[in-house]
Image (cartoon, rainbow, N blue to C red):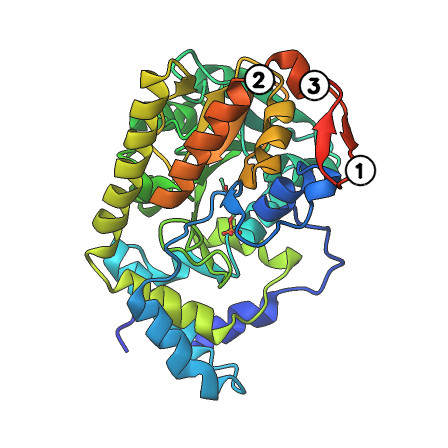
Amino acid sequence: MPSTHLSRRMFLRSAAAASAVAALPIMTEPQLAHAQRRMAAKNMPAGAVRIDANENPLGPCSGACSSISSLIPEGGRYDMDLTVKLVNTFASIEGVKPEYVKVYAGSSEPLHYTVLAYTSPTQPYVTADPGYEAGMYAASLRGAKVLKVPLTATHAHDVKAMVAADPNAGVLYICNPNNPTGTTTTREDIEYALANKPKGAILLVDEAYIHFSDATPSLDLVKADKDLIVLRTFSKIYGMAGVRCGLAVGRPDLLEKLNYYGFNSMPIMAVAAATASLQEPTLIPMRKKINADLRNATFDWLTANNYKFIPSQSNCFMLDTGRDGKQVQAAMAKQNVYIGRVWPIMPSYVRITVGTHNDMMAFQSAYKDVMSKSAAELAAPEWTGPGGQRHNMLS
Ligand SMILES: Cc1ncc(COP(=O)(O)O)c(C=O)c1O
């Protein structure tokens, strides 16, 4: 095996270095999506339109499905070589050294561990607002201050304000494109953040949605040994959220600190499916186009109907209901269309995930119906009539 490749021995050594410490609970997208569903609708009924958790309805690609099914009989083995193969495949496609890549069951784990490792009661966590909340939970568990910096007028990360937020900041989190807005941050701004961040801080660049967008990836900055960790996941464009595989990419000395919080062997089907996905060269452009076409058709429909939204480059976008977003979310759920959550800084907005064509058609008809109701009708408390039918106090 060439020396640039991660050997099985190196893999085992790094796994052995991991300490067993009490784990702090990890906050994830499905938990966050679930938390904002109304109590009555916690469990989605059959046939529900699920556009609330930024999942990819296309699921794993055909190569990934074949890898998973062909490996079922091998399920009795740990087979770490399959993880090594994934690392080496990713490393050779992206031109990074294998030692710079660590594999996890999704990117929630390395996101959580990075925040635990690099923030503290004296080293705050700096993030965008609205922004993906998982890192904020990790920082709070660590006893670190969470500094939320509003996005700019163009919904990019306000890197100038982020670097200036606290001279002792431990982590600056940049989600590119951002969850929930699907808006991007320029390469110039990421370089500015790297050059001007507080001395002891690292940049955590979350590229969960990068392949849906035209944003410039930051892996070359990792290759240049800068102070950043880049997160990738197979949950989004690769459609493997339930299969669970993700990567942290960074200088080995930066990644080493994550080991303290946990390092487990990977499900063999997840790593084999991830490797197969990377080996399908047409997958990303094809899925990027499918998502963009559906998203743009939805935007055209919203525009034609005078509904407001923030244009996005991702598989989700923010829709301005002009009402209480939580009430709209609840009203949509009553029509079996489960849309995403509301961020406190934008109380009239709800996050919409781009689903299938049928999902988006169902979204359109439910949304039109919900928006035809007055704000008072949406707010009115419900009661159940004699036939078990639900009414609100105005109907
Ligand atoms: C911005 C962002 N980062 C990371 C994740 C983690 O995803 P997973 O753990 O499924 O890889 C998500 C999930 O939705 C996300 O939205």
* Residue type at the position of mark 1: Pro
Q: Secondary structure at mark 3?
A: helix
Q: Nearer the viewer, mark 3 or mark 2?
A: 2
The answer to whether the residue labelled 3 contacts the one labelled 2, judged by CB atoms less than 8 Å apart, is no
Q: Secondary structure at mark 2?
A: loop
On the rendered structure, is 124 left or right of 381?
Answer: left
**Mark carried by residue 184:** none
- Give whichever of discs 3 and 2 has the lower sequence position: 2
* Residue type at the position of mark 2: Lys
Q: Residue at x 52, y 81 (%)?
A: 78
Q: Nearer the viewer, mark 2 or mark 1?
A: 1
**Mark carried by residue 386:** 1
On the rendered structure, is 168 left or right of 178?
Answer: right
**Mark carried by residue 379:** 3
Q: Is residue 174 above or below residue 323?
A: below
As drawn, the residue found furthest toward the front would be 387
- Give whichever of discs 2 and 1 has the lower sequence position: 2
* Residue type at the position of mark 3: Ala
Q: Secondary structure at mark 1?
A: loop
Q: CA distance from mark 3 to mark 2?
A: 10 Å
**Where does label 2 land, which residue?**
373
Q: Is residue 337 above or below residue 88?
A: above
Name the spot of residue 334 as percent of width and height, x first: 62, 36
Q: Is residue 342 above or below residue 362?
A: above
The answer to whether the residue labelled 3 contacts the one labelled 1, judged by CB atoms less than 8 Å apart, is no
